[in-house]
Amino acid sequence: MSEIHDPVLAKPADLCCLKGDFHHGEPTGSIIQIEGVDTYIAQPDPKVANGNILLFFPDAFGLHINSKLMMDAYAACGYLTLGVDYFLGDAVTKYSTSPLNDPNFDLPAWAAKHLLPSEEVAKKWAQNVKDKYGNDGKAKLGCVGYCWGARIVLQQLSEGGLCIVGAIAHPSFVNESHVQNSKAPIAFSVPATDKLFSNESRTRVIEICTEKEQRFNMQVFSHVGHGFASRTKLTDPYELWAKEQHFKAFIEWFDFWMAQP
């Protein structure tokens, strides 16, 4: 039996995935249980609610303060936003708040432990969210993923997925098959230099999406690193600007595609 050729486009999570800052603020959402899975839910103000749902797939830190504040921001733009703890209480933050400086934390072992199980959790969770909040099929579902969540977004945009549009920032653990199998519109926000997602990989993603005539957009920022969108160094004015631009672009992307008949 011949080996399936499935080149890696975004490499496995590495130490660069653990860099960046923890942010400060008071989350306005809450943690609920959906079929036994911890879920952060951010409700939009009824005055701006658009009736649609955004599934949020976080980075290795899981439902930490940065993710919660971002979900609050998506909700403030009209989307009922729900984030999944697909690590089931075993996110990186369980072991260390400073894993880069923690000799006892083994990132490759942790990642290998959660790679496939997190996909299964996310798939079942997405269906449960749709069943619970889908408003009898009237609500449209979109999804956004950061680093670890990238391939989950692509899976949700594939034939068996539930979402009509997706967006990804600084991906990891993505193979060609993930991109090939995705069908719905997809946006990317990435650093110009990222050892996990190289210039060659970026070009290959563009080639794949172009060849299969998939709707896509790719936003590339210079002078930022992997994680710039989710663990922004808020003391760096340019990186903060890049974070805000990525968010603005994602909101405009979701708004456009959710409005299509």
Image (cartoon, rainbow, N blue to C red):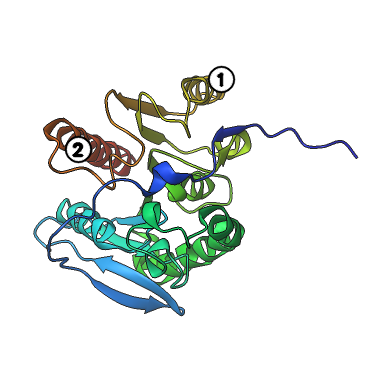
On screen, residue 126 versus residue 142, left or right, reads right
Name the spot of residue 45 as percent of width and height, x first.
Answer: 12, 62
In the displayed image of the protein, which residue is found farthest to the right? 1
The quarter of the picture where the C terminus appears is: top left
Residue wearing tag 1: 211
Q: Quadrant of residue 33?
A: bottom left
Horizontally, is 199 left or right of 46 in the view?
A: right
Q: Position of residue 211 (x, y in %)?
A: 56, 20
- Residue at 58% of width from left, 58% of height from top? 109
Residue 248 has which mark? 2
Residue 85 on image: x %, y % = 41, 67
Crowding around mark 2 (Cα neighbors within 10 Å: few <14, some 14 to 19, many 20+) is few
Residue at image location 49% in from the left, 28% down from the top: 214
Where does the image place residue 106, in percent across and percent down from the top left? 52, 58
Residue located farthest toward the front when viewing the structure as drawn? 103
Local secondary structure at mark 2: helix
Q: Earlier in the sequence, mark 1 or mark 2?
A: 1
The total number of labels drawn is: 2
**How far apart, in angstroms, are the residues tagged by discs 1 and 2?**
27 Å
| Residue nearest the observer in this picture, 2 or 142 | 2
Three-letter amino acid code at the position of disc 1: Glu
Amino acid type at image mark 2: Lys
